[in-house]
Image (cartoon, helix red, strand yellow):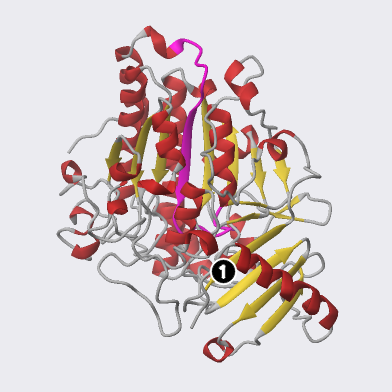
């Protein structure tokens, strides 16, 4: 099957669209570019900083090739202390609702076919996922006149429930989104899991790419660009949930980028899976660049806001056990209570920054800036409604705060300095609540016998950002101060506790 290059596709789209594409737009287009299981260091863009807030490179930054992320970071602001939930479904539900998982109760990853409550997990956790009654911001944008598009992974509800298909949650278009959280295969020859790999995890809606050499990341990118072109023809602002299955396992290689890593694989001792992971990272980055180039060719880059974010800690198959890998030197991987389990890369930028574009005055963004102040995936909800001129839903409790000040200025003195991470299930970290207030972080484990770690751990992230030294025994007064606050936050949010 022949596919045009993205340059040719964008050029053809530009020639085929009406003159309205070049006119000023009073509300921005918004692209939420979500990467699955991407760690803080799975990029050539440094997301670690020194004591002065200056970026410092870590070894993994020199392994990966992500020039499009570098381009986006130069155009906007990168956040180095940005938290998601520790696993996929809770994060994605927190993104769309603006609420902490402790409040919306989708606290574990959703299994398509059955409720995956583990030994001590709360029986009443919200396995059935989201519905339109949750006042999701894409639905609010659609009601305000936006054309809403979902491409790629959804993982918001199991089979047979309302949120199984994104169309039921306020998206005008859904391509490749369903209950599954991972692809059966990244290969077009395998039908993305239909003819090879895991059939129960086959990615839907991409039949035209079956039996071709089109990698899943590329297929989703081609579909996204086509939908952007269609949105432009409609003459309405659009919201695009560009939700890649990459870089979740299986770590099948993206053959377009394999030669970039074969020469260094032996010298660095990279496993075949690690090489596959690196190609998935580069393919994801190429997708970002293709979409940015298409926006330029269509004449809508100045009117388009791009939000780049990972959905939870990374899962790179680099060895070193469960504690160290994708976010190293930060401790922890996906599912863990440590920083590497929940800190994710995040960049916000206008696709083409311009002081002359009136729409950008709705959300001024510093270019080439590094923001070290704490922020969370819940903050997108109020930020995007604000920039789109859409009112917050009456009576809905939102745990997120607008990012506007942090994007325009180096700091926000009025902003909260805390985050609650609640995971009453079993994973790499099991049955825990982590609470960060300022530079102090306390972890409470409800069943410490499961992990073999202490019931309470305490870290000073200012002096020990990589969580080497547990201070719970040395600083009991801080434990006595923070533990009641942790419990208070859980109670306020109606959190469900392990049995």
Question: Looking at the image, which residue sits at the far top?
Answer: 19
From the top left corner, tell me how far across and down residue 84 is, in percent.
Answer: 56, 57
Q: Start and end of the magenta stretch?
A: 22-43
In the visual, does 398 lie left or right of 257? Answer: right
- Which of 64/307 is in front? 307
Relative height, residue 489 to residue 349 (above, below): below
In the visual, does 66 lie left or right of 441? Answer: left
Asked whether residue 323 appears in the rendered view, the answer is: no
- Which of 488/222 is in front? 488
Q: Quadrant of residue 168?
A: top left
From the top left corner, tell me how far across and down residue 75 is, in percent.
Answer: 62, 32
Residue at mark 1: 422
- Which of 189/331 is in front? 331
From the top left corner, tell me how far across and down residue 444 is, in percent.
Answer: 64, 79
Q: Quadrant of residue 402?
A: top right
Question: Looking at the image, which residue sits at the far front?
Answer: 395
- Which of 447/265 is in front? 447
Number of marks: 1
Relative height, residue 177 to residue 180 (above, below): above
Q: Quarter of the image containing the N terminus?
A: top left
Residue drawn at 29 percent across, 36 percent down = 173
Asked whether residue 264 appears in the rendered view, the answer is: yes
Q: Secondary structure at mark 1?
A: strand
Residue drawn at 47 percent across, 76 percent down = 425
Relative height, residue 444 to residue 6 (above, below): below
Q: Is residue 21 magenta?
A: no
From the top left corner, tell me how far across and down residue 69 is, in percent.
Answer: 55, 42
């Amino acid at each position: 099957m022949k596919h045009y290059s993205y340059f040719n596709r964008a050029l053809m789209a530009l020639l085929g669209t009406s003159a309205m594409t070049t006119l000023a737009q009073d509300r921005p287009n918004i692209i939420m570019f979500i990467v699955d299981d991407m760690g803080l260091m799975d990029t050539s863009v440094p997301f670690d900083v020194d004591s002065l807030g200056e970026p410092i490179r870590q070894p993994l930054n020199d392994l990966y090739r992500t020039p499009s992320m570098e381009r986006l970071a130069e155009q906007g602001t990168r956040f180095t202390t940005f938290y998601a939930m520790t696993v996929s479904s809770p994060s994605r539900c927190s993104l769309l609702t603006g609420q902490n998982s402790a409040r919306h109760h989708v606290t574990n990853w959703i299994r398509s076919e059955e409720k995956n409550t583990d030994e001590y997990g709360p029986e009443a956790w919200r396995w059935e996922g989201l519905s339109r009654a949750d006042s999701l911001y894409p639905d609010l944008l659609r009601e305000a006149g936006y054309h809403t598009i979902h491409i790629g992974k959804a993982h918001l509800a199991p089979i047979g429930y309302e949120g199984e298909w994104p169309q039921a949650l306020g998206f005008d278009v859904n391509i490749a989104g369903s209950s599954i959280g991972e692809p059966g295969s990244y290969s077009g020859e395998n039908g993305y899991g239909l003819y090879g790999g895991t059939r129960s995890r086959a990615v839907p809606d991409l039949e035209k790419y079956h039996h071709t050499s089109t990698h899943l990341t590329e297929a989703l990118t081609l579909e996204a660009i086509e939908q952007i072109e269609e949105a432009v023809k409609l003459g309405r602002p659009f919201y695009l949930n560009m939700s890649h299955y990459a870089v979740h396992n299986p770590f099948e290689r993206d053959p377009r980028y394999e030669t970039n890593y074969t020469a260094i694989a032996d010298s660095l001792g990279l496993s075949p899976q690690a090489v596959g992971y690196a190609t998935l990272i580069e393919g994801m980055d190429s997708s970002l660049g293709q979409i940015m180039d298409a926006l330029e060719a269509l004449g809508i880059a100045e009117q388009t806001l791009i939000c780049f974010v990972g959905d939870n800690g990374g899962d790179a198959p680099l060895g070193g056990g469960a504690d160290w890998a994708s976010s190293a030197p930060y401790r922890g991987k996906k599912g863990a209570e440590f920083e590497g389990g929940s800190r994710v890369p995040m960049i916000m930028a206008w696709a083409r920054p311009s002081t002359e574009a009136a729409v950008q005055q709705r959300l001024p963004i510093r270019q080439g800036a590094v923001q070290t102040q704490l922020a969370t995936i819940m903050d997108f909800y109020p930020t995007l409604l604000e920039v789109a001129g859409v009112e917050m839903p009456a009576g809905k409790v939102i745990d997120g705060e607008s990012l506007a000040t942090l994007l325009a200025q180096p700091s926000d003195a009025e902003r909260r300095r805390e985050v609650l991470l609640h995971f009453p299930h079993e994973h790499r970290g099991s049955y825990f609540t982590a609470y960060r207030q300022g530079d102090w972080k306390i972890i409470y484990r409800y069943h410490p016998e499961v992990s073999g770690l202490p019931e309470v751990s305490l870290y000073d992230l200012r002096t020990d950002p990589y969580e080497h030294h547990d201070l719970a025994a040395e600083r009991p007064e801080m434990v006595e101060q923070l533990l009641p606050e942790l419990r208070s936050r859980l109670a306020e949010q109606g959190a469900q506790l392990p049995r």
